[in-house]
Amino acid sequence: MTDRRDLTFEDLLRNAGVAEAQSRLERLAPDPATLPPSELERRRGSAARAGGGGGCGSGSCGCGSSAPSNTLLDKPLDRRQALGTLFGALAVTTQAVGACSPVSMESDEEREAKLLERDEFFKGNYRLMTPEEQTETVRRLERLAHLRGQGDVQIRTDQALEGVMYGYAFNISKCKGFRNCVEACVQENNLDRPSDRQYIRIFEKPDGESIDDLEHADATYGHEVPAEGHYYLGTQCFQCANPPCVYVCPVQATWQEPDGIVVVDYDWCIGCRYCMAACPYWARRFNWSEPEVPAEQLNPRQHYLGNRARKKGVVEKCTFCIQRTREGRLPACAEACPTGARVFGNLLDPDSEIRWVLEHKQVFRLKEDLGTEPRFWYYMD
């Protein structure tokens, strides 16, 4: 017998999976002593005709399942495959038990959703996926959204455009604090409604007060705007060229795309919130509960790295509306601004509006001394 000290991590997981599967079947199998004589005789006859013992797992109970083979377990597996084997065995066991039970409490759609969720859990990091794997995971997510009653969503995986580096400029002189941008962002990016989740903050500050001091600025004002003797300043993710949030992530769930957008693979985020602590611009938000968006308010045009459904226990952020900008459209906040205070464009295009602003206006950035190199500038007329 193999010494337990010689067992690998994978061996333990595989053995645990088989043991758990067998244990579940044994617990749910009927006790022969409690069966009527006629039913017991019928089962014995079925087992004899099948050439072996009866019961679930022998192929004679009507569910079509068979005893587990050791073939798969004999193959070398890495840690992720071993975890997949463990949970895969439990999922198959659940299906077999459901088929053998007199009454299954799960519908076909519920069982399908569970299998899709399992496959989603064991998929790779987005950056390591092949185009085929990206297509498959998008297909699963779209199907899951339908099964969960979220409607028919279309999730895109548009890659960064060549020759594009996005940048943003904010005209303090023009912003009047209306917050149309905030509302547009909430709707476009499917932000959680019960918690009043917002990526954008519009701060109201007294005239003459330093722009750099936002620690005590008011972003929750509820009075009529613009208020006399005050000015307004917006913040969101600044898509830094040197993003500290990316460097501190222990699982590489967040990174910077070639077009400058810092994104998150929400299925790889472990919710440690190191990125929140590292960001000096308060740009990231943690989901303390499962985000909720009413079906009638859900934006079905989504991007895998942007406004698709997030979940409890992960960190999310602004992506410059990646689902829009990679189609050549403006972010929702810039499009919704009624005063023209927001300028968005390609920093590599010498004829873009944002390049004109940078070349003809006196611009500055928040906390430039930190070396984060934000691609978000402020200026005044």
Image (cartoon, grey):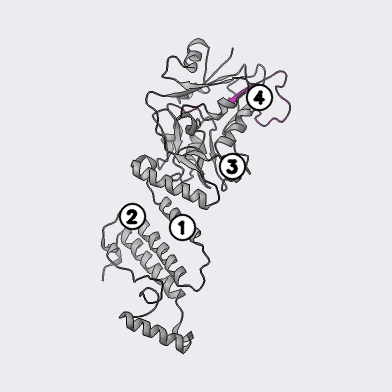
Q: Earlier in the sequence, mark 1 or mark 2?
A: 2
Residue drawn at the location 63% of the way across and 39% of the way down: 196
Q: Earlier in the sequence, mark 1 or mark 4?
A: 1
Give residue 31's position: percent from left, percent from top.
46, 82
The dot on residue 192 is 3
The dot on residue 46 is none
Give residue 126's position: percent from left, percent from top.
39, 41
- Element assignment for label 2: helix
Q: Amino acid at mark 1?
A: Glu
Q: Amino acid at mark 3?
A: Asp
Q: Nearer the viewer, residue 236 or 205?
A: 236
- Element assignment for label 4: loop
Q: Which residue does the numbered mark 2 point to in the structure image?
A: 81
Magenta stretch in the rendered image: 215-241
Q: Which residue does the numbered mark 1 point to in the structure image?
A: 112
- Quarter holding the N terminus is bottom left
Camera-side mark, 1 or 3: 1
Q: Earlier in the sequence, mark 4 or mark 2?
A: 2
Give the spatial CA distance, label 1 vs label 2: 21 Å
Give the spatial CA distance, label 3 vs label 4: 22 Å
- Quarter holding the C terminus is top right
Q: Amino acid at mark 4?
A: Gly
Tell me if residue 362 comes above or below residue 2 in the rendering: above
Is residue 228 inside the magenta stretch? yes
Label 1 close to label 2 by CB (< 8 Å): no
